[in-house]
Image (spheres, rainbow, N blue to C red):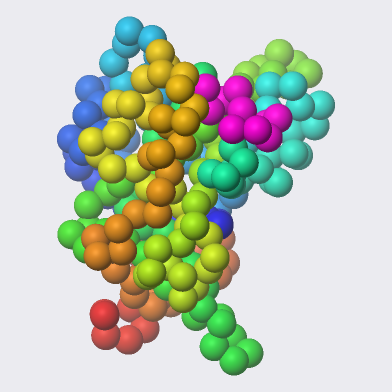
Amino acid sequence: MCGRFSLGASAATLASHFNVQESLASTGRYNIAPSQEVLTVVQRSGSTRQVRRMRWGLIPSWAKDPAIGTQLINARAETVATKPAFRVPLRERRCLILTDGFYEWESQGRRKQPWFIRMQDGRPFAFAGLWDQWTDPAGRGVESCTIITTTPNDLIRRFHHRMPAILSPRDYDLWLDVQVRDVARLLTLLAPHPPEEMTACPVSSLVNNPANDSPACQSSTIDRK
């Protein structure tokens, strides 16, 4: 699964990597948790890419209670095309969820050691995401999203039996293209990311508490491997 991640890259770096023209505010997020606001990129038909801030935890448009979003922070790649909450967004409302790393926990006796997982070169990257819009009783629209997960690669397997589906930059256009509704083609993009492009580092237990959101969450506890 993916239950906590980071986005500390500069606004200029994000704008360049994700090819967005609009001005981005500084991010500086180091411990993003479910129900919090995340940065996404979407693309409307015939338009350029747009940056959208969404709530993490998908609330389907047909939901009666927004609390369902707490159960839908992740969507399994194996069932995303058939689950009622995800099948329409997979065809019509896909997004990039921006990040530069995520956290997993390794059991070590009675304690769990958090690890920060990122790209070897430190570049930002994108989780494959789905989004939807729910309307509250007052008529206000709430945009929310979910992170698709897949089977783990050899690096992640030591920590968890799932990992976020990470999109290659060459596949951003295809994933965002609302004209593409070939589900089988889209599902091929949700494979485990090559482990040789990634690295993991043990970090401070500060990240265990979502209230802690600073670079100190990523302080290495031992020499980087």
Q: Quadrant of residue 67?
A: top right
Using residue 93 as the reference point, say whether residue 220 is left or right of it.
left
Q: Where in the figure is residue 33, as x and y percent of width and height?
A: 55, 53
Q: Is residue 119 magenta?
A: no
> For the magenta stretch, what is the residue range?
81-91
| Residue 178 is at least partly visible in this image | yes
Q: Where in the figure is residue 3, as x and y percent of width and height?
A: 55, 56
In this view, the residue in front, 78 or 69, is 78
Picture layout, residue 5 above or below residue 185: below
Where's the N terminus, which quadrant? bottom right
Q: Where in the figure is residue 186, as x and y percent of width and height?
A: 43, 31
Residue visible at 18% across and 59% down? Answer: 121
Where's the C terminus, which quadrant? bottom left
Residue visible at 63% across and 90% down? Answer: 110
Q: Where in the figure is residue 114, as x and y percent of width and height?
A: 48, 74
| Residue 4 is at least partly visible in this image | no
Picture layout, residue 95 above or below residue 200: above
Q: Residue furthest front?
A: 184
Residue visible at 34% across and 54% down? Answer: 193
